Every structure is written in C-alpha cells, then in structure tokens.
Amino acid sequence: MKNNKEFLDNMSRDPSNWKGPLYLNRKDPRLLVPKLHPSLGWTLNFANPAAYIAMAALLGVIVLISILK
C-alpha cells in the first residue's frame, strides 16, 4: 500500500505531467493530486474526466447561489 502511494506521489512530482499550472496524467487515477510544491495545496487531475464534472458542479453551485440571492 505504501509503495502505491509513493508511486502516485512520484507521478505528481514529475514535471512532465504538468502543462503550466495544470496536472494531466491519464495513468494517475486520483482526482485530487498535490501540487508540485505540496505546501501550495492540491489541484485536479485534468486527464481524469471526473475533474470536468467536479468543475461543472462547482460552477453550477456558484450560479445557483447567485440566482437565489
């Protein structure tokens, strides 16, 4: 189990998986990954289709809240 976590963490630290500020790695099954500098937080894996669903849901909630105000 620990080896798998290390393997995934190494993938997120690999600069070739980053396109500017976006993380794109089809081999990484995680939706949320630590940024290149983990102290900066987490980001979405935009190679994972669920990332777009999460972004659309967040946008939908923001629009709904602004309409209901």
Image (spheres, grey):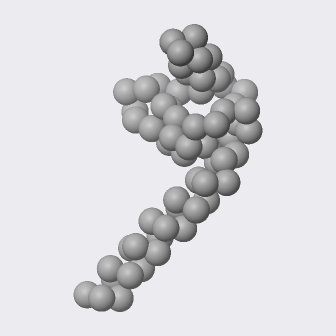
Residue lying at 43% horizontally and 26% vertically, measured from the top left: 38
Residue 53 locus on image (x, y percent): 58, 62
Q: In this view, does 13 lie to the left or right of 37?
A: right
Q: Is residue 63 left or right of residue 31?
A: left
Q: Residue 41 lies in what quarter of the image?
A: top left
Q: Is residue 56 above or below residue 17?
A: below
Who is closer to the viewer here, 13 or 51? Answer: 51
Residue lying at 32% horizontally and 79% vertically, measured from the top left: 65
Q: Is residue 13 left or right of residue 49?
A: left
Question: Is residue 21 visible to us here?
Answer: no
Q: Is residue 38 above or below residue 57?
A: above
Who is closer to the viewer here, 21 or 65? Answer: 65
Q: Is residue 64 above or below residue 38?
A: below
Residue lying at 64% horizontally and 23% vertically, measured from the top left: 11
Q: Which residue lies furthest to the front in this view?
A: 1
Report the number of discs. 0
Residue lying at 60% horizontally and 43% vertically, measured from the top left: 45
Residue 33 locus on image (x, y percent): 52, 35
Residue 52 locus on image (x, y percent): 61, 59
Who is closer to the viewer here, 32 or 15? Answer: 32
Question: Is residue 1 visible to us here?
Answer: yes
Q: Which quadrant holds the C terminus?
A: bottom left
Q: Which residue lies furthest to the top in this view?
A: 3
Q: Is residue 28 above or below residue 9?
A: below
